[in-house]
Amino acid sequence: MYAELHCHSHYSLLDGAAAPEALVARAVELGLPALALTDHDGLYGAVAFWRAARAQGVQPIIGAELTLAHGSHLTLLAENQAGYANLSRLISRGQLAGSKGHPMLTIEEMAQHSAGLLCLTGCRRGAVARDVQADDPVRAGRSAGSAQFRLQRLALGHIRSTGNSPLTVRAYAAQDTRTAKRRSSPLVE
């Protein structure tokens, strides 16, 4: 069973084009049991998304792709009401700490408000994915094992691999507008 956990609506300017309701409709067409809305640094479409998903029988997952102080991105999903409250706090802190259009969060701030949140490695602007896309699996492994990434794993406590399989990051790096090369690298054993 598949569920998209990193989806942007038109509230993520230059990254998403569809309204939250249209994303839910497409999820229904594809037979997805759940869908996560993870717009950039905000929850602007969360209410419309939640209502549309519930009405269509799709499990809504609320999240956001947050910008860290050093410029990389990290995706957080609310696991429960406490997670939603913490996600809201983190978004507010990031918006207040940065300038307009450039929110900034630190790992330490995230650690203070991590209860109820699931953490993904982020988009192609995440530290691990960036190294995989650069075709540098050694550096990607170092990024995954870096103090910052370990802090993310420990503080948020929810990055898990299943069973004994390694955490694997898959990246699609476009060679041109028509083709993509798939790369996969085990990062944590």
Image (cartoon, rainbow, N blue to C red):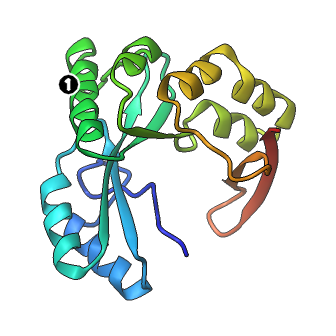
Seen from this angle, which residue lies furthest right? 138
- The image shows residue 9 at horizontal and vertical percentages of 29, 58
Comparing 159 with 71, the one in front is 159
Instruction: From the viewer's perspective, tell me whether residue 82 is left or right of residue 107.
Output: left
On the rendered image, what quadrant is the N terminus found in?
bottom right
* Residue hosting label 1: 92
On the rendered image, what quadrant is the C terminus found in?
top right
Count of numbered marks: 1
For label 1, the SS is helix
Comparing 14 with 4, the one in front is 4
- The image shows residue 147 at horizontal and vertical percentages of 66, 14
Instruction: From the viewer's perspective, tell me whether residue 86 is left or right of residue 29.
Output: left
Position of 175 relative to 76 (above/below):
below
Q: Residue at x 46, y 17 (%)?
A: 107
Q: Residue at x 50, y 22 (%)?
A: 155
Position of 51 relative to 151 (above/below):
below
- The image shows residue 120 at horizontal and vertical percentages of 52, 42
Q: Residue at x 28, y 66 (%)?
A: 18
Q: Residue at x 35, y 37 (%)?
A: 116
Please state which amino acid type lies under the numbered disc 1: Ser
Instruction: From the viewer's perspective, tell me whether residue 10 is left or right of residue 153.
Output: left
Comparing 176 with 24, the one in front is 24
